[in-house]
Amino acid sequence: MNNIEALLEQVRAAAAESENLQDPIDSKSLADAEQKLGFRLPPLLAALYATVGNGGFGPNDALLELCDADPSDGTDTALGEYLTLAIPGGTDPWWRWPAGVLPILDWGCGRLACVDCQSEDETVLLFEPNAIEGEYVAAAWFVDSPSLADWLQTWLDGRGWYEADLDDDVSDMQPWSDAASRL
């Protein structure tokens, strides 16, 4: 068993205790979601959705569903959030969302945990809109964890910044150095 398989086993065990855990998605739903996103999910993120569950686990048992089996129920999904946020121009001409950065967890108050699906290590980013300076959206992006694997291990170990208080100041987080070039 490799490190990723061992991590997935730990996540499955922790997720099994969640009352919000959704059934894993099938390969067709995963492929359909990737087609709508315009990019493939990185391996660990795809494995989470396909083998652990389609959301409802992780920090606060709140990982977003990738896609909704019943779109009429109004459930927020990672796919829906991305498609909404990534609309070029939108109502604010200065608004930009980086391509390939998928929201996976809504912390509330506009904060989102996101996976950079273009990074080799599946970097987990925190979007903190309260940090935006004027129209400089790049100031809202922070590196929560250098990899999705580390982020999951931090959750499993109960060491996440969110454990103490969701209103913690993120000023000690490293700004995402690629933000300006990716927006």
Image (spheres, rainbow, N blue to C red):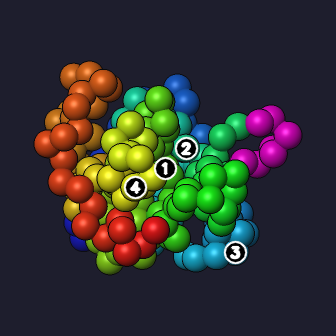
Q: Is residue 146 visible?
A: yes
Q: What secondary structure do most residues of the magenta stretch adopt?
A: loop
Q: SS for tag 1?
A: strand
Does residue 118 lie above or below 128 as drawn? Answer: below
Where is residue 28? Give x, y as percent.
72, 69
Q: Which amino acid does label 1 sit on?
A: Ile
Q: What residue type is labelled 2?
A: Leu
- State which mark lies toward you, 4 or 1: 4
Q: Residue 136 carries which label?
A: 4
Q: Which of the two labelled residues, at mark 4 and mark 3, occupies the earlier sequence position?
A: 3
Which residue in the protein does label 1 denote?
A: 104
Which residue in the protein does label 2 denote?
A: 64
Where is residue 138? Give x, y as percent.
37, 58
Give the Cα distance between marks 3 and 1: 17 Å
Please tell me which residue is depicted at 58% across the width and 76% down the height of the picture.
39
Figure quadrant of the N terminus: bottom left
Q: What residue type is labelled 3?
A: Gln
Magenta stretch: give its range: 67-74
Question: Within 10 Å of the Cα at label 3, are there few (<14), some (14-19), or many (20+) other Cα atoms?
Answer: few
Does residue 116 lie above or below 65 as drawn? Answer: below
Q: Which of the two labelled residues, at mark 1 and mark 2, occupies the earlier sequence position?
A: 2
Please tell me which residue is depicted at 14% across the width and 42% down the height of the picture.
172
Give the Cα distance between marks 4 and 3: 30 Å
Marks 1 and 2: CB-CB under 8 Å? yes
Marks 4 and 1: CB-CB under 8 Å? no
Quarter of the view holding residue 116: bottom left
Residue farthest front in this picture:
134
Q: What residue type is labelled 4?
A: Tyr
